[in-house]
């Protein structure tokens, strides 16, 4: 039930073109499951994914201090890793698409991790 409402909110934002990613400023969208968190950079002009990272990625798993994907520490670490990847690709600014989730908890920690690593959200 809650997932259906979240998807409806997400579609409404994307349909109204309030959140749109370009080559210079891609859309950073997020997906949160019960155990993991995923971050995706999308160029909506070309309709392609630029890069992704998740709590299942090798970079995240190799660092034992990262925590898990289902807690705040892990979400912040995944956001930090995404920012590092984006900076290597020459992306400094993104527009954040919270995908219908409330901006608190793991979503907020993800964004704070990305900001701390130098990404302008």
Image (spheres, rainbow, N blue to C red):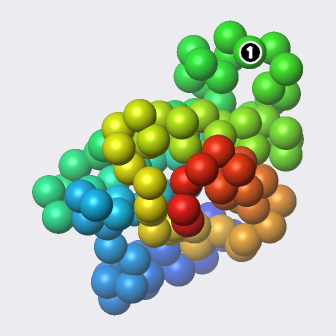
Residue at point 39%, 85% (across, down): 18
Residue 116, visible in the rendered structure:
yes
Residue at left 19%, top 56%? 47
Expressed as whole percent of the image width and height from the top left, the position of residue 11 reads: 41, 76
Location of residue 9 with respect to 59 vertically, above or below: below
Among all residues in the image, which is located at the extreme bottom? 16
What residue did someone put label 1 on? 63
Q: Which of 99 and 84 is in front in this view?
A: 84
> Eyeballing the image, is 115 above or below 51?
below
Q: Image point 34% across, 63% down: which residue?
A: 25
> Residue at image x 59%, y 19%?
59
Image quadrant occupied by the C terminus: bottom right
From the viewer's perspective, tell me whether residue 55 is left or right of residue 91. Answer: right
Residue 82 image offset from top left, x and y in percent: 54, 40
Find residue 105 and report its image quarter: bottom right
Q: Position of residue 71 (x, y in %)?
A: 85, 41
89 relative position to 71: left or right: left
For label 1, the SS is loop
Q: Specify whether residue 37 is in view.
A: no
In the displayed structure image, the side of residue 9 where residue 63 appears, left or right: right
Judged left or right of residue 21, residue 118 is right
Front residue of 119/65: it is 119
Count of numbered circles in the view: 1
> What is the x, y in percent for residue 29?
48, 58
């Amino acid at each position: 039930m809650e997932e259906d409402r979240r998807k409806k909110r997400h579609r409404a934002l994307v349909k109204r073109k309030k959140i749109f990613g370009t080559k210079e400023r891609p859309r950073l969208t997020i997906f949160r499951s019960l155990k993991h968190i995923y971050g995706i950079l999308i160029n909506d002009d070309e309709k392609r994914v630029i890069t992704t990272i998740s709590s299942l990625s090798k970079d995240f798993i190799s660092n034992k201090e990262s925590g898990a994907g289902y807690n705040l520490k892990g979400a912040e670490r995944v956001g930090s890793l995404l920012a590092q990847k984006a900076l290597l690709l020459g992306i400094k600014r993104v527009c954040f698409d919270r995908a219908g989730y409330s901006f608190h908890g793991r979503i907020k920690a993800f964004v704070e991790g990305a900001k701390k690593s130098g990404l302008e959200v």
